[in-house]
Image: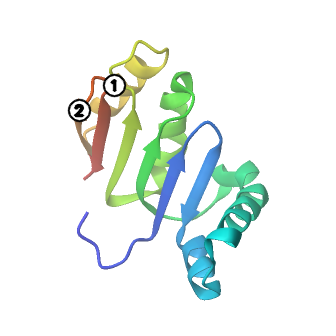
Amino acid sequence: MNRKSIKGILVVLGIFIIWDSALMTALAQKKPTPENLDAKVEKFLKENQSNWQDWNVPFDFIFSDADKEWYPQYFKDLEGKLVKGGCFTAHNVDQPFGGIKEFLDYIQGLPNYLTTIHRPGGAGISISYKK
């Protein structure tokens, strides 16, 4: 991604952690200290995690490391929010978890994505760029 500004980053973990431009801007304006940063992020998450699928926000980067069996659905739900030229990554794609093969088969079969697997330590990370 060679962009002058980042529209948003989404990290999908065991719970959904959303890091978007609105949160980054709000935090930057308030110049949070380490002591109050956690509280601000937690407040943002509590207010927004239940309706993340309804957000009409673009993301440049999405990192998924959540429930592996849900990888295919997470991608399908979030793909439309990823900007052209954006990157969708998923962790542990070399592991024998349910949903991984279905996810990889699906994303590698899409003509508008270029997907590679990086294997730095055996777990595997898929890196997919939206054309």
- Callout 1: few (<14), some (14-19), or many (20+) C-alpha neighbours within 10 Å? few
Q: Position of residue 116 (x, y in %)?
A: 21, 36
- Callout 2: few (<14), some (14-19), or many (20+) C-alpha neighbours within 10 Å? few
Instruction: Kindly identify which numbered label has been placed on residue 120.
Output: 2
Q: Compared to 106, does 22 lie above or below?
A: below
Amino acid type at circle 2 is Pro
Q: Residue at x 47, y 15 (%)?
A: 97
Q: Residue at x 31, y 35 (%)?
A: 126
* Element class at badge 2: loop
With 99 as the anchor, is 85 left or right in this view? Answer: left
Instruction: Kindly identify which numbered label has been placed on residue 123.
Output: 1
The total number of labels drawn is: 2
Q: Position of residue 124 (x, y in %)?
A: 30, 28
Q: Residue at x 60, y 87 (%)?
A: 29
* Element class at badge 1: loop
Q: How is the image coloured?
A: rainbow
Q: Compared to 54, does 31 lie above or below?
A: below
Instruction: Kindly identify which numbered label has been placed on residue 80.
Output: none
Q: Quadrant of the N terminus?
A: bottom left
With 122 as the anchor, is 80 left or right in this view? Answer: right
Whether the residues at callouts 2 and 1 have beta carbons within 8 Å, the answer is yes
Task: Decide which of 128, 110 is in the foreground and name it.
Answer: 128
Residue that sits furthest to the bottom in the current view? 29
With 23 as the anchor, is 2 left or right in this view? Answer: left
Cα gap from disc 2 to disc 1, whole angstroms: 8 Å
Q: Compared to 112, does 71 lie above or below?
A: above
Q: Position of residue 98 (x, y in %)?
A: 49, 14
Res. 69 image quadrant: top right
Q: Position of residue 62 (x, y in %)?
A: 44, 50
Amino acid type at circle 1 is Ala
